[in-house]
Amino acid sequence: MKTREKSKTNKLYVLIRHFFIRFLNNELIKYSSERSEHLIFAVVLFAFSGGIISNHLLKKYLVAARVLEDIHPWQVETSFLTIMMALMGIICVVIWDNIFLDKQDFFNLLVLPVSTGKLFLAKFLSMLMFVGTLSVLFVFTSTLVFTIYLSPTLSVNPFYFGLVFFITSFLANLFIFLLVATIQGIIMVLFSRLSLHKVLIYAQLLLIGGFLSVFVWYPKIFPKLSQFRDRFSSFIDYFPPLWFTGLLNKLLPSEDAFFTKLMHTSVAALVLLLVIYFLSMFIILKKYLKSSPLIKTRIKFSKSLFFLKNIFYALVLRNPTQAAVFHFTIKTLRRNMKHKLQLALVMIIPVGLVITTLIYGYIEKKFAYFKEINSFLISIPVLLYIFLIPGLKMVIKTPAVFEANWIFRMTEKKDKKHYLAGFKKALFFYAIFPLFILLLLFYSLTWGFKLAIYHSFFGITIALLLMEVFFIKYRNMPFASNCLPYKANLKYSWFIYLLLFSLYLTNMTALGIFLIKNPIYYVIFYVAAFIFLIVLKLVRYKTKEEFDFIYDEEVEPVLLSLNLDQ
Amino acid sequence: MLEVKNLTKKFNNIPVVNKVNFVVKPGDILGYLGPNGAGKSTTVKMITGLLKPTKGAIYFNGKQVDGDNIDFKRKIGYVPEQSHIYSHLTAFEYLQLVGRLHDLPEKLLAEKISALLEEFKLSDAMHISLSSFSKGMTQKVMITAALMQNPDILILDEPLTGLDVSATFVFKGLLSRMAQAGKIVIYSSHILDVVEKICSRVVIINKGKIVADDSVKGLINLMKLSSLESIFKELVQQDDSISAENIFSIMQAGKKAKIKKREGQ
């Protein structure tokens, strides 16, 4: 009897451990294949980042406390919670696929003598463990810093403050986890299996964009928090880190009605999310068990679309190899989560910067800001393309299914120009051209159609030249080659990259301003661009003889001898 | 004619394939047999150019070929042992990718894909992502990919994995038909009864070395055994046979029986 009871407890333990490790196996991190030092490094980095962030926030507050009298401790607490919750949000989106019991769990675990209830319980407990572990890691050092800095001013027992601070941080992280889970759960419940994958990818991208954008707009909001409180701004009701600041202060305890209201919101939100999480988990289970794995679908082109498709093929994709690489590149970019996330992570910086600057431009000058030809508006295409093209290069260097590249290796031809043309055309139609259309629309609405045409074409010409420059020595089959990241030696070269980036951005912006004010010079610009393009093609043609696709990059001899390739 | 001469492949200086020699003539279906880890897939990968031999060479119609020989590669249809496939593509898209890389014209390609998938009863699923396919369905797609460009040499590495009975039956018939048309078929497998039925010649490899090379009938007469299975047992599984009795006793351990250790352990 005792043995049986013991085995029952073990089963739950085994399941919790299994689900916990699955959180570490996601699109970006493969726990089993990574070296343990990487994980330890990540843990240490994560643990210390909490302390460093809180120290940075508080030091500033204490040193300048008398000068910045309008900044209160609760504002600093809000800042810390905001950063922590945004980071937690990003982690949750990365482990997105493992939040709910998935197809793999259903098919592998439901056939074993394990009850559905136990599966639910194990998944929930593993989730609590995961959030708890992250909270402990992130909050440990910061709790110390907050206790040292704030408890004397708040006249609270330091240990009690530490405990309350940890509990609040844990609940704030749990809130974010449940929020992401709830969004995913609602999508999984509402959408059919066919559209589900697409919708989930877009939701994931939006969420990661949202969490990353916090780092761009929050610094500008921070000084105004006090004003929001005084004016009873509705911002307070919709900003979750403030709810948990309320909870923290209420537990300290504070009698301030402002904190009481915020605490009530935080508790209500947590309960609501917990209910939705369990409910959606239950409905998803039913959905998986009922649904059939295959759904009959056929894509039918209308006559006019079929005609357009044929024209496109005749004009752009006459060669079969080009067509093969073109479609493979576009479909992989469109469908693979890993690649989309990589591109989103690269693009979030310039896009965030552009959106924030435009919003602040509007706040300061209303629509007049968009009418003037200022250097920021001119620099938008220059800025976006300089991130987009290296970003695309980085993304296509990540293999889709490395082991499946045998099909490219077995069919590889001597002349590589069609392969190169195929994926360059794909990158153009997938990313560069849509951005061109978007910019054309934006500038048409702000500066009028004529200037929009001038500047958008200037932008796309620069983009095409950049693409040629970035891919001039490209030797990998897109999404089919294994590239070694440590080949890029950034130890010394980062400074050169930064310098080149600054030079490029300032000079191209200056050129853009000059050309838009003196349109006649566009002719010279396009002639120069054309000559530059020809030179690049010639350089490429000269190196053609020694050109062979690299599928598996060889490890440097020095790394081999030091056994660092493992 | 495809000729393999002294083919050797070493990994970390350990020979996985050791001085392998055989010849396959047009119209031959060569059964390439061996237990797991014998070196079958490594040999196949060297023939297809996916691995470079450490020593030895491959000749096609008297000319030496290697991994860079594109004309030779064009003639090969290959079904790999493990169905590594781009699962984010649909069956139609994957076959389109393969066909285009083989330079098949668009119209012919689309017609061939539709017709072949219809034959394999996959036309209803052709626009579904391969990630939702079963093992057998994926295998059918891999076979279709190998057949599309009408190859002169068909190299199959465990091609029947996951296939249903009717598909297996059709496939076996197709191989005979291809042999009649003068194609070269190399059929690497450890499923002996299929090899016995369809292969005109059998090469048995064990621990990287060839231990038999003859027709099934020739081997039966030579070794005076009743079937290919008994020949295989005799040649390959003498020294490290897997004992059903041992496995069963290990299964029973903890209830009645004790785990019996093998001799030498």
Image (cartoon, rainbow, N blue to C red):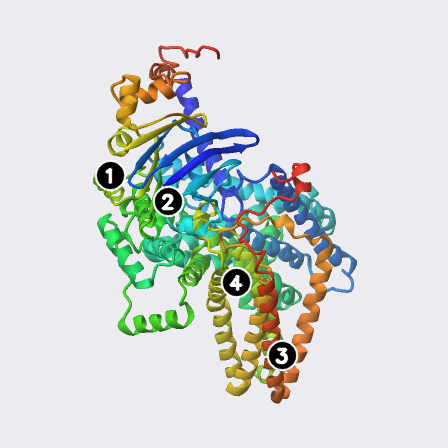
Mark linked to residue A237: 4
Q: Amino acid at mark 2?
A: Tyr
Separation of disc 3 and disc 2 at Cα? 49 Å
Residue situated in front as seen by the camera: B108 or A343? B108
Q: Amino acid at mark 3?
A: Ala
Q: Residue at x 60, y 81 (%)?
A: A527
User: Disc 1 or disc 4, which is closer to the eye?
Assistant: 1
Tags 1 and 3 on a common chain: no
Mark 4: amino acid: Asp
Residue A51 drawn at (x, y percent): 69, 48
Q: Residues within 10 Å of mark 2 (few under 14, many from 20)?
A: many
Q: Using the image as rendered, state which of residue A495 and residue B95 is in the foreground.
A: B95
The answer to whether residue A80 is above or below residue A98 is below
* Residue at which label 1 appears: B172
**Please, what secondary structure does the residue beneath circle 3 have?**
helix
Q: Name the residue located 64 percent from the left edge and 54 percent from the top edge.
A: A80
Give the Cα separation between the discs numbered 3 and 4.
56 Å
Q: Are marks 1 and 4 on the same chain?
A: no
Within-10-Å neighbours for mark 4: few <14, some 14–19, many 20+ = few
Q: CA distance from mark 2 to mark 1?
A: 16 Å
Name the quadrant of the N terminus of chain B. top left
Taking the image as shown, residue A244 lies to the left or right of residue B156, namely right
